[in-house]
Every structure is written in C-alpha cells, then in structure tokens.
Amino acid sequence: MNLPNAVTLLRIFIVPVLVVVLLTRVSEAWFGVSQRLLGVAIFLAAALTDWLDGFLARRRRQVSPLGMLLDPLADKLLISAALIALVDNRLAPAWAVVIIIGREFAVTGLRGIAAREGLVIVPSRMGKFKMFAEVVAVALLILSMTDEGGPPVTPYAVPVFWEAPAFVHVLARFSASGHLSAHDVRILLYSAGRAVLWLVVISSIWSLYGYFRQFYAFVRNPMPGRLSAPQLAQAEEDVLARLPGRSS
C-alpha cells in the first residue's frame, strides 16, 4: 500500500457516498446543502483523484500492479454509479447508460484475456476523450436536477434524447429579454448534458472498436518471440524489484 493506491481506494469509498447523496434527501435534511451542489462537488472531487493518483504514482515512482488493477476499477465504479443514479432521477436514458456500462465490461474482459496472452492494450485517445466527456456530462446533468429531483420540466416539443428545442427557445428568450431564471439555467444545463451524453455514447462505441481492432490485429499477426504469460509476470516482477525502495 502506498499513497497513490490510497488515493485510488478513497475514490472507491466515495462511490457509495455519492449514490446516497444523489438518491436521497440526506444532504438537505442533515447539512442544509442543495442535493445537486453537494452531489456535483463529491463527483468532481472523486474525478479529480483519478488524475491525482496517476500523478503521484509517476512522481513518486510507485507504479504497482495493485494500482494498475484498482485505478480502472475505481473509474468504472464511479462513472457507473453516477450514471445509474441519473437514470433513477430520470436525467439520463437507460438505453444510453446500458451501452456505456456494457462497453466498460467488454473492455475489461478484453484486457483480461489480452493480459493472459502477454499483450498490453494501450488506452486510446478516444477512450481518454470518452472519460473526459463522461465527467462533463454527469456534472451537467447533476447540476440540472430540480429541487424536487428529476429533470427540469419543459413545455416545448422535444426529442427523446437531446432537449434541442428547449435549449434554443431559452437562448432566444434570453437574447430578447437579457434575463434567465433559475429554471431556464437548469434547462440549459440539462440540454447541454444530454448533448454531451451523445458524445459519450458515440465515443464509447468507437473506442470499443479500437480496442477490439488492437486485439484482433495481435491475434492474427503475433509478434515473434513474444513472452508467455508466466514469462511476462516474471519480467514485471524483475522490473518492480529494481525500483527504488523495493527490497530485493
């Protein structure tokens, strides 16, 4: 156990706290703080630890097999819990969340199979963009939550997925009057969050295709002299043994 891994574990322990805040009125009943404000603060703080644990691991040269296992697991738990809570609050469509979470299971299984064969699947830029878009989408949707819970009610004819007419109507009214009510702000946040969620769904599918393409290319054209799984494990142990502070 080291400091980077402790930060990663903290992110895992934050997940049930986030779920309680998003699905109950405990924040307002106990602390007098708005449910959406406390929820987005907890979520963004947990998302920040994703950058912090990686920075500390590289800075302190404490990259470890445990950290490599816990970090993606913590990310998936945080995003999955937040998205499921948004579905319960009617802020995100269930079908989109199923696609996003299903992609995470597929990538985890693919990486596990690849690791046993001695293949390291490198995270793609699209995968990193997906994670960033997920954080933005979840934060916007949490902030759009009404005081009673759920999405802001709009009297406009809207598509199922993106509140585009409501977004345009509010902007047009703002340009005419120069005033936005709190409800209007929530509509703008909700519309923007649903739009970014579209990007998350598309990037999830596209990055999943990229991972499968990496794996399929390796299966069809294996590199000569590739290490077996036991040899790879021994090589990793040898590298870790040479790190500063690691006893021989």
Image: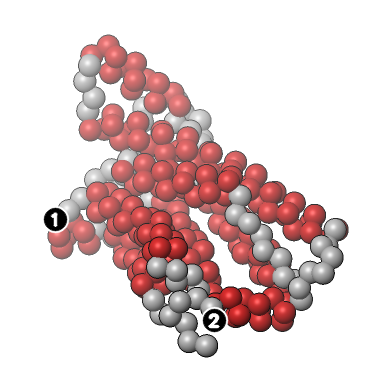
Dot 1 corresponds to which residue? 32
Residue 105 versus residue 139 in the image, above or below: below
Residue with the most extreme top position: 176
Q: Is residue 176 left or right of residue 53?
A: left
Using the image as rendered, state which of residue 137 and residue 70 is in the foreground: 70
Calculate the distance from the C-alpha at mark 2 to the C-alpha at mark 1: 51 Å
Residue 190 screen position, x and y as percent? 38, 37
Which residue is painted at 43% across and 66% down in the image?
Answer: 57
* Foreground pick, 227 / 135: 227
Mark 2 or mark 1: name the one nearer the start of the chain: 1
Q: Is residue 23 above or below residue 247?
A: above
Q: Is residue 62 left or right of residue 108?
A: left
**Image quadrant for the N terminus?**
bottom left
> x%, y% of residue 70?
49, 70
Whether residue 106 is visible to the viewer of this picture, yes or no, is no
Q: Secondary structure at mark 2?
A: helix
Question: Mark 2 — residue?
Answer: 241
Disc 2 marks a residue whose amino acid type is Ala
Crowd tier of the residue under label 1, counting other residues whose Cα lies within 10 Å: few below 14, some 14–19, many 20 or above: few
Q: Nearer the viewer, residue 201 or 74?
A: 74
Q: What residue do we see at 27% from left, 49% from top?
A: 36
| Residue 182 quadrant | top left
